[in-house]
């Protein structure tokens, strides 16, 4: 697993998992969003859609996907909405 990477407040790392067919799939472990104070314990895992013959290719794909998701704002869809604090008055 790589060291923590910090992009636009998100803290994540990437890793590679071996699949049964001898291929490798990249994984992104999103740990927190420091700007909003959200922490994900355990980390949210996002796998790359493609599998590769080489570990290095899978790691590159995971790094690129993480950056794409963060830059486009799509990462929030994968993380789910933050827990809403309900302040409804009793009726």
Image (tube, rainbow, N blue to C red):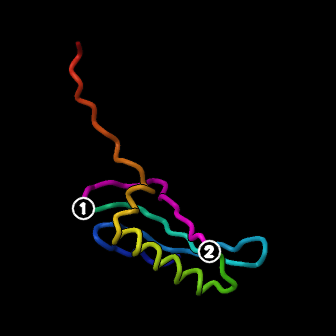
Residue displayed at 34% across by 73% down: 6
Q: Is 74 on the left or on the right of 16, as rendered?
A: left
Residue displayed at 41% across by 55% down: 77
Q: Is 43 on the left or on the right of 52, as rendered?
A: left
Q: Nearer the viewer, mark 1 or mark 2?
A: 2
**Circle 1 — which element?**
loop
The crowding category of the residue bearing disc 2, from other C-alpha atoms within 10 Å (few below 14, some 14 to 19, many at least 20), is few
Specify the farthest residue to the top.
91
Q: Is 91 on the left or on the right of 73, as rendered?
A: left
- Tell me which segment is drawn in magenta: 36-49
Above or below residue 3? Residue 33 is above
Residue displayed at 78% across by 71% down: 20
Residue receiving disc 1: 35
Task: Give residue 50's mark.
Answer: 2
Residue 45 located within the stretch drawn in magenta: yes
| Upstream in sequence: badge 1 or badge 2 | 1
Residue 78: give x, y in percent of width and height. 45, 57
Residue 72 located within the stretch drawn in magenta: no
């Amino acid at each position: 697993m790589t060291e923590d990477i910090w992009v636009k407040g998100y803290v994540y790392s990437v890793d590679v998992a071996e699949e049964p067919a001898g291929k490798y799939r990249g994984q992104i472990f999103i740990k927190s969003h420091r700007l909003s104070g959200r922490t994900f314990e355990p980390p949210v895992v996002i796998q790359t859609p493609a599998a590769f013959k080489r570990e290095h290719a899978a790691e590159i794909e995971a790094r690129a996907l993480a950056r794409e998701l963060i830059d486009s704002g799509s990462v929030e869809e994968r993380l789910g909405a933050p827990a809403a604090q309900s302040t409804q008055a009793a009726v």
